[in-house]
Image (cartoon, grey):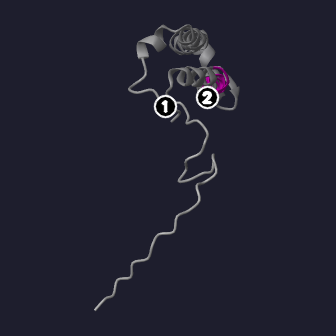
Amino acid sequence: MTQVVHSPIASRAPAPPGAPFGGITGQPSPAPAPAGPPDFVAIQNSPEFAALRRRFRRFVFPMSALFFLWYLTYVLLAAYARGFMSHRLIGSVNVGLVLGLLQFVSTIAITVGYVRFARTKIDPQVAAIRTDAGVAEE
């Protein structure tokens, strides 16, 4: 048979103030996260968001227009300036081929430029707006 021994629990001296116990400290707790989703209408109407949209548009719209004009020029030259586009530069490489390859080069250059622009100009503003709205970073 099992024998049960009852021993008294020794009392401890009280912990000094501010001593950690189970993660509890004397420091104030951080501010609670806002409840519910962010107020998207307030964010959209804020001057910071309006400035973000202006900055984005100042890059994207002119760059899109320039690329469209460059592409349209290439297409119109290919359709109506056959003599110019078929002019041989080196061996069997003609003007049309070079301009066609420059379409790819310009696309890559625009992409690299936008990534740099977004990383340095757009992303910091987005982070500030997210922080002001109380939205955690992903």
**Magenta-drawn stretch contains 53:** no
Dot 2 surroundings within 10 Å: few (below 14), some, or many (20 or more)?
Answer: few
Along the viewing direction, whichever of 62 and 102 lies nearer the viewer: 62
Query: Which residue is disc 2 drawn over?
Result: 108
Q: Please state the horizontal and vertical placement of residue 36, each as a whole percent of the image.
A: 38, 26
Query: Can residue 16 be seen in the rendering of this structure?
Result: yes
Q: Which residues are magenta?
A: 108-121
- Residue that extends furthest to the left in the rendered view of this protein: 1
Nearer-the-camera pick, 62 or 126: 126
Q: CA distance from mark 1 to mark 2?
A: 45 Å
Q: Position of residue 130 (x, y in %)?
A: 53, 24
Figure check: 13 above or below 73: below
Q: Amino acid at mark 2?
A: Ile
Helix, strand or loop for disc 1:
loop
Amino acid type indicated by mark 1: Pro
- Residue 84 at x, y = what percent? 63, 14
- Magenta run includes residue 111: yes
